[in-house]
Image (cartoon, coloured by chain):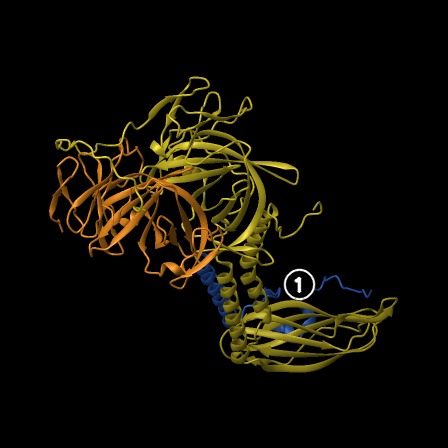
Amino acid sequence: MFAKLYLLYGFMVLGGIATAQYRGWSLDRISQVKNVPRSIRDNPGAYRSIYSSYHHYTGGK
Amino acid sequence: MGAGQPPIPPQPPRPPQPPGPPAGPAKPQVKSLNCPQCGAAITLRSFQQAVTVVCESCHSILDAKDPNLTVLQQFKAATGELKPMIPLGTRGKLRGTDYEVIGFQRRTIFSDGEQFDWHEYLLFNPYKGFRYLSEYQGHWNDISVCKSEPGIEHRIVDRANYLGEYYRHFQTAEATTSFVLGEFPWQVRVGDPVIVMDFVKPPHILSYEKDKQSGEVTWSVGEYLYGKEVWQAFKLQGQPPEPIGVFENQPSPNTVNLKQLWGRFLLLCACLLGLLVMSDLFSSNKVVFSATYQLASGAPKGEASFVTDVFELKGRESNVEILTEANVANNWIYLNYALIDQDTGRAWDFGREVSYYSGSDSDGSWTEGGRNDKVIVPSVPPGHYYLRIEPEADARHPAISYKVEVHRDVAVFGFYGWGLLILFVPVALLTFKAISFERARWAESDHPILKSESD
Amino acid sequence: MTQPIANCPNCGAKVVFQWPSSVQTVCTYCQSILVRSDVDVKKVGQVADLPPDSSPIQLNTEGIYKNKAFVVAGRILYEYEQGGWNEWHIVMNDGTSAWLSDAQNEFAVSFAAKVPPQSLPNASQVQVEQQYVWNGETYIVTAITIAHYKGVQGELPFQYWDKTDVKFADCRTHTGKFATLDYSDEQPTLYLGEFVEFDDLKFKNLRQFEGW
């Protein structure tokens, strides 16, 4: 019984993966922005990236 | 026989007598006798099958075959001695057959200086005969004598073969009867030692018992019973005692066939691998844009951000992979990316860092980070796109050259890694649970799975 | 099946041998043990009242063994140190004799085996845990019992009325089969059979127990 349920579960996982693959889903964190003005092409500096305040790694060991 | 018989003296012929009435039902159902020791009433419930009977009031063990009930032995019962949980004389239906409880005994083994007691209830049905119920710390077994002789096979752990099934040796111990009540179809004495060996194949148990004096061997086979089944069978009041620990032949609460489950897991892994190969084959993975840029050394002069040429993304709505390769060495470059749809103004915004450090210390040489980075942008509809790129770097960085490549519709390997993990979790949990249960079962045996420190 | 009727030489009552294989019977009126020969019926002994026992089987109990109907024709009640057991003489519907033993409600059906007696171990040789092979099966001697008859009832396929102790060796296999070496006669006799479940024999006309 459980083995059957597990098989069902497994196929659901596989189906999910296939769907994710087909629909082009991603595991990466990407933000969406709407209505970026066309003028950006002429003045790229007018666009402010969401991640520009990112804390940079300056490390090494 | 027949040969050399003394002649039979002739007897006077007797007139034929009318045949008597057909033999009526056997009775009395309960034969009433009195204890020769204390005079208390003795009840015999198994008709003429009783060999020994124990007086309930003075604990004299009496010879049931003797009409005068000779006292065979008398034993002292501790005051406050446990009463049988199923009183003698109780009737119940066990596996479709009515049985009456006619005898009770407590048996004791000493193992590692510890005393273990279990209880046995002798059940009787005049047609089906005898059966036993054993109880140890709330664990019950339904036991009957083996019809066939099991064979012991010597292995690393001995096993017994009974009717083609193998039972694994659990424990060998010397047991004595420490308390008796009621009647038994065999000679029972308090203190008589027997060697007992248990072999298990949950939910079944195979027990070998050898009388140390007579050498007589008895094999019996039992099946685990839950207290509530016993309570239902004998319509007992209250609740059965809660079982303590894991018993020798207690069925694992894990009813899953682990072998089968692992088989299913491997099957699903194969399917997962197949899916991975398929998606890698069927993903177009087309390079739609590729360019190399330079970030000049030192502090940025003026606006660092720029936009790329427009490229076309074709096909169905699918993912887009952006690969960044930078020749960093002991420094970093950070790129603020925006993938912008030229026509709709919709943008996907993400930042990527490429950093690579290397060196050597007392542990030898080391590296950290890498010169490549990739990111997957989800569900991008077809259309005309360009990238806005804003590079950042350390104030005193050397000139960094970096390459940006855009691929349409790629296989996402991360899905398969996660998929594998998700498939593995239930199998791993159940296997762990089953192993823990088996470890608890065998911990009390002569063959613990993992020996504890004290052993 | 009913055989010619004779009269009991002791009391004159009618004696009916119901089964062609029967050699001995007990007169139901005077309890004389009667043995038939080609010509007549002779009294060879006398049984006391059968001691009470608890077998659920009785004379004329019917049952089915391996798709063959049988009826209980007689019995020998044995007694030994630790108790007793019943050997019920059953007649199968093909006329063959067999034994249904009831030892504390453990039932077994056995047939006299056609084995040359000189191939069997003699009484002094046989010991517990010895192994013998009969009909390709390995039998292990599990118990040796010294017993004597305590009573007989009904029809038996041989004469049996001697009260001397005799030796029996019980043997078992790992497969539920059983054998008895019977040392009642000078020549040992082997009975081969198997343990049977009470319910599998589909008994009819069993003894009644009050309250059960």
Q: Is B299 drawn above or below residue C16 in the view shown?
A: below
User: Residue at position x 46%, y 20% from top?
Assistant: B57
Q: Position of residue B173 (x, y in %)?
A: 59, 43
Q: In the displayed structure, does residue C160 sit left or right of residue A56? A: left
Residue at x-position 16% and y-position 39%: C9
**Residue linked to disc 1:** A50
Q: Check disc 1 and give the amino acid type.
A: Ile
Q: Secondary structure at mark 1?
A: loop
Q: Quadrant of residue B51?
A: top left
Q: Is residue B14 visible?
A: yes
The answer to whether B391 appears left or right of C110 in the picture is: right
* Chain letter, blue in picture: A
Q: Which chain is yellow?
A: B
Residue positioned 36% across, 30% down in the render: B45
Indicate the chain on which mark 1 is placed.
Answer: A
Quadrant in the picture for residue B7: top left
Colour chain C appears in: orange
